Amino acid sequence: MDPERWERIEQLYNEALDRRPEERSSFLAEACRGDEEMRREVDSLLDHLEKDRAFLSSPAVNHILDNELLAHYRIVKKLAAGGVGEVYQARDTKLKREVAIKILPVEFSRDPDRVNRFQREAEVLASLDYVSYCTPVNEVC
């Protein structure tokens, strides 16, 4: 996609987020007038954001098994566990890609401050354009 077009889509997406949900449709109708493809792209991004928020606000789970399906993510294996949660390697069955999923402990899911920090972390990570992969052979990323 043309970088300038992507910048415009990103701009419209951010401007739509600055509006109340009930105002977004009329804003985008005006802003994308005559460019239905751009409108679909922005709507798709907004839709994914809402689905991600719904996924993050769903009840926490106590135990996850290898090969278990969470939404459209198939768990491959547990990667790490610590005070802020557990991280799993998973396969996004829709987009056919490897992902990492971090699960907030059940006791933290009742703490609005921790849930908000968890949400902000997810949003920051989702905004990254570059991902570096490390292997045991090449540990410097």
Image (cartoon, rainbow, N blue to C red):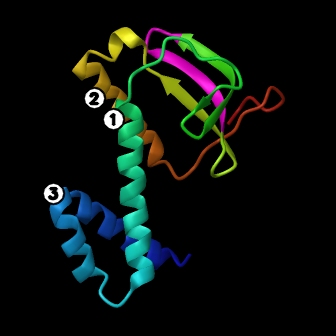
Across and down, in percent, residue 129 comes to 53, 53
| Of callouts 3 and 1, the N-terminal one | 3
Q: Is residue 61 magenta?
A: no
Amino acid of disc 2: Asn
Amino acid of disc 3: Arg
Q: Give the structural element (helix, strand or loop) at label 3.
A: loop
- Residue identified by numbered label 1: 120
The residue depicted at 60 percent of the width and 45 percent of the height is 131
Real-space CA distance between mark 3 and mark 1, rounded to the nearest whole angstrom: 19 Å
Q: Callout 3 environment at 10 Å: few (<14), some (14 to 19), or many (20+)?
A: few
Q: Nearer the viewer, mark 3 or mark 1?
A: 3
- Residue identified by numbered label 2: 116
Where residue 20 is drawn, which disc sits there?
A: 3
Give the quadrant of residue 16: bottom left
Amino acid of disc 1: Arg
What stretch of residues is rendered in magenta? 82-91
